[in-house]
Amino acid sequence: MCQQTKYQSFKSKNVLQCVQTLFALAVISSLASIALFNYPANAQTRMTIQPDGSLVPQRGAEPDESGSAVVKPDAAIDTTGNARAAPPAASSKPVVAATPVKLQNLTLRDETPAAIAVANARDALTKKAWAQLSTLVGPAQTDILGIYPAFWDLRNQLASNRNPSLDQALTAFLQRHPDTYLADKLKGEWILMSVATGDFETAVSLGAVSNSNSQIDCARLQANHVMGKRATADQAVKAFGSGQACWSLFDQLVADQVLTTREIIPLFEDAIEKNKVVDARKFASYALDKVDLQAYDVMMREPLRWLATQASAQRSAMRNEMVAIALTRMARGDLNATEAYLKREWQAKLPAAQLSWVYAQMALLSMGTLDPRADGFYHQAGLIRLSDNNHAWRVRAALRQKQVDWSWIVQCVDQMPTNMKAESAWLYWKARGLAALGKTEEAKVIYSQAGQQFNFYGQLALEEIGQQIIVPPAAQPVTAEELQQAKNHLGLQRAIALFKRGHRPDAVPEWNFALRGMNDRQLLAAAELARSVDIYDRVVNTSDRTTSEHDFTQRYIAPFENKVSAQAKSISLDTAWVYGLIRQESRFIMDAKSVVGASGLMQVMPATAKWVAKKIGMTDYQPGQVIDFDTNTKLGTSYMSMVLEDLGGSQVLASAGYNAGPGRPMQWRASLTHAVEGAIFAETIPFNETRDYVKNVLANATYYAAMFSGQPQSLKHRLGRIEPQPYGKSPLP
């Protein structure tokens, strides 16, 4: 509910990214990481591992200790659980949430000497009091979180010059704490450090990391390559993410002629497309000779002036590539002028491949402002290789046309990479295309495939084959034995202790790591455990992972129902929509705070909260009250109601307005040349976060409505149609 896309910390796609820290080994680029990837192994300078896996001299700033690497989706499901009877049929009665069992024996004991030692160790870590931290490792051992001080101490030592005794201590830690989040994390950091200092043998001996990321994958590939198990170009490209370990791998493989311009040019083009100029410069150094690389640097500074020197020159294949890049750089500044210049000066001079790529880039830039020329640019580009992002926008551009070319949409989806065209969005739009072309039976098969997913397009696909949205059959209730097994899981207990002691950034990855390999029954039990201790976001996250047995009272949990419903009904607001929005905004985390300052259950921005409080006559409002449950829900629902009224009663527009500010959906609506389905409007929102947000909120609301009413629902009806309307400035913040 701000003029910028505000909700990042608690979105389902991004919640894990919010707990990443310096040792999360994320994939970002920096000039420093490129320069330092060969830091000498015998250096005595204290080193720090950067988020991208790079080593830099420590300058007194210690990494944030609160986060972790992104947890990859579980690849395997444990199938050792006993077979169970088929779940009961879906009921037409309203769904009533099971009463959670409170686990009175799950004591945190944070007043014990060991727990106090853990707290003191964390304080020492924050202060970089390393000697003090080391003295607290032993006293902390008997606490449920006693592993953490030992991990912090070893990680600090790992950042210093390596020695045999440290290697022994690291090995002992891994052996003493097998299959734990921190052991896996420490192993990943040890691999990165080993490869960065040239100790490839150790990196290979450590083996795979469960909770890996691109930098660890690249480091392991390089270590194996150097030790004789040669890496392939496909492996390197698949693993790549901008960061020191991957650049080091690419340096090695380019030198060994494993990677050639065939693999480098697409990565080069995609870096230019994303405006990642540092990455692009690195790829340029692989693809271009010394003379062309100097010319590239000039071109990037002044593309138009450089292009003027190339019009009549004999150009190599690489120079033509540079011309195409120069034109796309110009288009970022002035699309209209670039289009005219391209047609006047380069249409007949540039080879077809480069010309098509320029048009595809102009199309993508056009869609950023919903410029109607985008679809025409895509057609001029033809069916060429595109980035995943540009594949998606090519279909979106086609969907915005008054007369949708369904044959073109089917072709575009078919050209997507295999994993991408299996996503429910593209399954749905391909099926729509096939149905429009008269291939109804083929379309039904794809609708059925998409309809197996509990999401926005899964719901729409079911409606296309005549099914309304209902709550699926409920799994058998979690048994006392299953719940006790979850309670006894040390990883889950550590996570709960972290949550209760206020260390959510550590707790989330600890919890997620504990879920690896769990079957549906174990996941349902873990979700029930989270519900019993009021950690609602983990209830949703955990239950969301089941594949065949489902409990929607967990997936679509509705805590505080009486209070939220009463507040919504008092201002004639759809309770299901309110819950759908809260589930997306905060996952029911009472003290949630986003990176731009939105707070509480409904993620209310400070300025908006103050404005709404004044508008509704809350004369005693103080800024600190924004995280209070009653205040937050009153302000949030009041603002929802205002935005809904301001945007003509459309939940599509109002959901977008709550996320991005009400002026933005007004602009997007004004860009329409004709009325469109609500699904098309939602899919073509130009902000990635807001687009996903709107789809998730409305899919959530549809399931909540089915649960609250016990009646079948229609997402299509909720979406409606969006009519073009001239832009008018909203009076709302």
Image: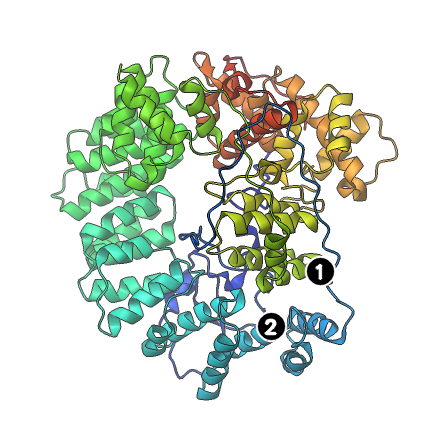
Q: Quadrant of residue 506?
A: bottom right
Is residue 226 depicted above or below 402 in this figure? below
Indicate the position of residue 343 as horizontal and vertical percent values.
23, 26
Indicate the position of residue 122 as horizontal and vertical percent values.
67, 70
| Residue 342 shown left or right of residue 731 in the figure | left
Indicate the position of residue 324 as horizontal and vertical percent values.
24, 39
Is residue 320 depicted above or below 106 in this figure? above
Label 1 neighbour load within 10 Å: few <14, some 14-19, many 20+: few
Q: Nearer the viewer, residue 697 or 388?
A: 697
Q: Nearer the viewer, residue 336 or 178?
A: 178
Q: Tell me what residue is drawn at x 72 percent, y 28 percent.
A: 637
Q: Tell me what residue is drawn at x 63 percent, y 24 percent.
A: 93
Q: Tell me what residue is drawn at x 74 percent, y 72 percent.
A: 116
Q: Nearer the viewer, residue 212 or 193?
A: 212
Residue type at numbered disc 2: Ile
Find residue 70 and name its label.
none
| Residue 637 shown left or right of residue 20 in the figure | right
Secondary element type, mark 2 = helix
Q: Is residue 382 visible?
A: yes
Q: Tell me what residue is drawn at x 52 percent, y 36 percent.
A: 87
Looking at the rendered image, the quarter that the N terminus falls into is top right
* Furthest-right residue in this view: 620
Q: Which residue is mark 2?
A: 147
Q: Is residue 594 visible?
A: no
- Marks 2,1: beta carbons within 8 A: no
The CA span between labels 2 and 1 is: 19 Å
Residue type at numbered disc 1: Leu
Find residue 106 and name its label.
1
